[in-house]
Image (cartoon, rainbow, N blue to C red):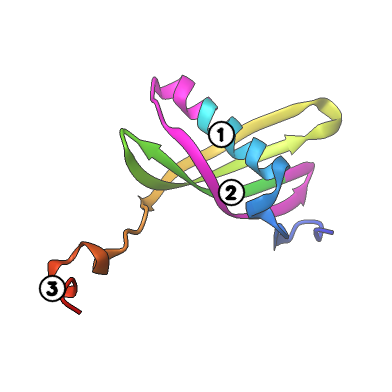
Amino acid sequence: MATVGGITEVEGSANSLEIDSLARFAVDDYNKKHNSMLEFKKVLNAKQQVVAGTVYYITFEVTDGGHKKVYEAKVWVKPWLNFKEVQEFKLVADAPLYVFKSLSIFDSI
């Protein structure tokens, strides 16, 4: 259980249907507001903070025009009011690539 006011890891967040749904909600919200076509792929990590409801800090992977990217979203949820709001949505980085596989000097090893 989360500590009131403290930010804690969400156990099993990569396999959580609830966290997956919130990440998809954030991507859909961003796409509508920015006329974008980000495609949700998977949750990488999530943290939560209990306030008047719960604020989730979710890190996830998307594709943007075929390129993998990592974003973070801050989503505020008040389930008793059926309320969800994306408070922040930002690019963290391009998703890491397996550099050694793409470098020809390693092909002969």
Horizontal side, residue 98 vs residue 92: left or right: left
Against 44, is 89 above or below? above
Measure how far apart labels 2 and 3 are at the Cα level. 37 Å
Mark 1 lies on residue: 26
In percent of the image, x 35 and y 59: which residue is there? Answer: 96
Horizontal side, residue 48 vs residue 2: left or right: left
Q: What type is the residue that disc 1 sits on?
A: Ala
Mark 2 vs mark 1: which is more N-terminal?
1
Measure how far apart labels 2 and 1 are at the Cα level. 9 Å
Give the structural element (helix, strand or loop) at label 2: strand
In percent of the image, x 49 and y 41: which residue is there? Answer: 41
Mark 2 lies on residue: 58
The x, y position of residue 61, in whole percent, is 47, 46
Horizontal side, residue 54 vs residue 25: left or right: right
Which segment is the magenta one?
29-54
Q: Quadrant of residue 12?
A: bottom right
Give the structural element (helix, strand or loop) at label 3: helix
Q: Nearer the viewer, residue 18 or 93?
A: 18
Q: Is residue 37 magenta?
A: yes
In percent of the image, x 78 and y 35: which residue is there? Answer: 78
Against 79, is 60 above or below? below
Which residue occupies the extreme left position in the image? 105
Mark 3 lies on residue: 105
Viewer-nearest of discs 1 and 3: 3
Mark 2 vs mark 3: which is more N-terminal?
2
Q: Are marks 2 and 1 in contact (CB under 8 Å)?
A: yes
Give the structural element (helix, strand or loop) at label 1: helix
